[in-house]
C-alpha cells in the first residue's frame, strides 16, 4: 500500500532532518526504506547498530541514513544536532520512533530549525481511496483496524493474535524503556477499562478508585499510553460556550478494532480519521489545530469540534442510523459563526442538507474524501 506522506517526506529530507513518529508496527520502517533505493539502516535496539551509531560510521555514499528508535539513546537530540551542524543535509537523515518524538523534542537541547516532524497513523479511508473500494475498506477497518499487518490479512482471527503480541511488546518493553514502571498489571487493567469507555469522559479520580491508585499515578499512566501511541486524547472545548464542562477528556485507540462496542468503534474510527487529518495539516502545512468534544452541564453534547488557527471550523456528530440532525447543532452553532455542521451516519439512505446549513452525510464516503483544510 502507498502511504500518503511519502512524497512530502522525500521532499523535506532535502533540507531538514525528518522525525517520523507513530505507533509500533504502523509501517514507519517500511515507508522509510521505500523513499530511496540506496539507504543505510541502523536501529538503536540492536547492539551492533548501537556501536555504529555511536561511532557515526554509516555509509555516507548512501542517499539516506535511517536511524530507528534513536530516542532511546541518552541525549539523542544533542547528538543529532551535532551530526547535522557538522555534516549538514547529506546524507539525508531520517529518525523514526515508536514513542512520541513531538513530545521528546520539547525536552533538553532544541533541534529548532533543523527538523520537520511527520506523524504516521494507521490506514484510514482517505489514504485507502483509489487502492480499495470504500465499502470494502470500511468493513475491514471496522473489523480489524488500520494497522498494516492485520489490515492486509483481513481476518479477525489474525488480528486477535497480532493484538496480544503488539500490546505485550508495548507494555512490557517500550513502556519500561520510556519509564521504569513496575506495576505493569495496573497499566494493562487501565487499557481494558479504557476500551469500554471509548466515547465517554474519563475521570482520573474514578479510575484511581477503581485501580486503588492515586489520580496523579493514573494521569502518568495515561500520558505514557499516549506517548506510546496506544491512545490519544480528545479534550472538551469551552471557549465561548457557556456552562461547559472543562476538565474530563475522552480517550480513543489508534487500533480501532480494540473497541468492543460497535457504536463506540464507529466513533473511534471517525476520531482516528480526524486526528490523522489534523496531524497532516500541522506537519505538512504548519496549521495550528485542535480536536475537541462539546458538552454542557445541562446535557447538550456533540461528538467532535474541529478547531484550526484558534477557530472552530467543524461540528461533527456520529450516528449509526439516526438521520435526524441532533438539536445540539443549533445550540452550539449560536456561539460559533461560519461553522460547518455535519452529522455522519453509517447506514444512510439519502444524503441531505438543511436551510441552516446542517449536513447529513454518509460516514464512509465523507471520511474517504476528508479535506478539513478547505473549511
Image (cartoon, grey):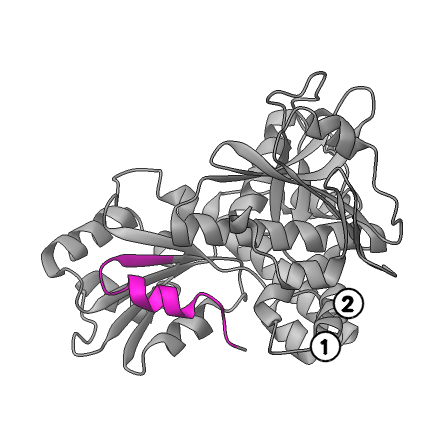
**Residue 208 or 89: which is nearer the viewer?**
89
**Residue 349 or 228: which is nearer the viewer?**
349
User: Count of labels shown?
Assistant: 2
Q: Which residue is mark 1?
A: 154
Q: Are marks 1 and 2 in contact (CB under 8 Å)?
A: yes
Q: Secondary structure at mark 1?
A: loop
Residue 304, quarter of picture: top right
Q: Residue at x 50, y 69 (%)?
A: 27
Quadrant position of the N terminus in the picture: bottom right
Q: Residue at x 67, y 42 (%)?
A: 251
User: In the picture shown, does residue 373 fall above or below 357?
Assistant: below
Whether residue 193 sits left or right of residue 165 in the image: it is right
**Residue 131: horizontal and vertical position, in percent?**
60, 78
**Residue 268: horizontal and vertical position, in percent?**
71, 51
User: In the picture shown, does residue 247 fall above or below 27?
Assistant: above
Q: Which residues are magenta?
A: 2-19
Amino acid at each position: 500500500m502507498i502511504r500518503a506522506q511519502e512524497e512530502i517526506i522525500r521532499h523535506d529530507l532535502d533540507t531538514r532532518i525528518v522525525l517520523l513518529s507513530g505507533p509500533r508496527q504502523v509501517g514507519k520502517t517500511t515507508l522509510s526504506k521505500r523513499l530511496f533505493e540506496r539507504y543505510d539502516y541502523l536501529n538503536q535496539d540492536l547492539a551492533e547498530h548501537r556501536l555504529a551509531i555511536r561511532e557515526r560510521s554509516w555509509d555516507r555514499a548512501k542517499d539516506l541514513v535511517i536511524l530507528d528508535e534513536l530516542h532511546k539513546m541518552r541525549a539523542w537530540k544533542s547528538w543529532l544536532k551535532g551530526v547535522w551542524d557538522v555534516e549538514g543535509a547529506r546524507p539525508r537523515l531520517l529518525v523514526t520512533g515508536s514513542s512520541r518524538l513531538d513530545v521528546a523534542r520539547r525536552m533538553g537541547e532544541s533541534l529548532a530549525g533543523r527538523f520537520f516532524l511527520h506523524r504516521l497513523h494507521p490506514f484510514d479511508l482517505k489514504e485507502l481511496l483509489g487502492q480499495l473500494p470504500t465499502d470494502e475498506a470500511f468493513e475491514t477497518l471496522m473489523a480489524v483496524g488500520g494497522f498494516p499487518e492485520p489490515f492486509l490479512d483481513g481476518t479477525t482471527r489474525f488480528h486477535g493474535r497480532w493484538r496480544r503480541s503488539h500490546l505485550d511488546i508495548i507494555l512490557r518493553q517500550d513502556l519500561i524503556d520510556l519509564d521504569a514502571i513496575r506495576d505493569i498489571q495496573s497499566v494493562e487493567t487501565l487499557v481494558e477499562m479504557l476500551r469500554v469507555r471509548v466515547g465517554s469522559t474519563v475521570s482520573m479520580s474514578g479510575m484511581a478508585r477503581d485501580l486503588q491508585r492515586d489520580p496523579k499515578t493514573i494521569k502518568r499512566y495515561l500520558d505514557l499510553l499516549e506517548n506510546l501511541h496506544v491512545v490519544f486524547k480528545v479534550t472538551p472545548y469551552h471557549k465561548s460556550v457557556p456552562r461547559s464542562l472543562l476538565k474530563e477528556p475522552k480517550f480513543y485507540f489508534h487500533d480501532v478494532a480494540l473497541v468492543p462496542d460497535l457504536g463506540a468503534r464507529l466513533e473511534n474510527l471517525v476520531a482516528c480519521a480526524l486526528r490523522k487529518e489534523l496531524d497532516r495539516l500541522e506537519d505538512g502545512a504548519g496549521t495550528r489545530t485542535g480536536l475537541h468534544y462539546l458538552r454542557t452541564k445541562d446535557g447538550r453534547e456533540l461528538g467532535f469540534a474541529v478547531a484550526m488557527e484558534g477557530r472552530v471550523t467543524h461540528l461533527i456528530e456520529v450516528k449509526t442510523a439516526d438521520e435526524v440532525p441532533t438539536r445540539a447543532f443549533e445550540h452550539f452553532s449560536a456561539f460559533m459563526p461560519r461553522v460547518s455542521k455535519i452529522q455522519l451516519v453509517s447506514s444512510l439512505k439519502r444524503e441531505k442538507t438543511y436551510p441552516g446549513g446542517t449536513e447529513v452525510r454518509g460516514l464512509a464516503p465523507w471520511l474517504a474524501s476528508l479535506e478539513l483544510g478547505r473549511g
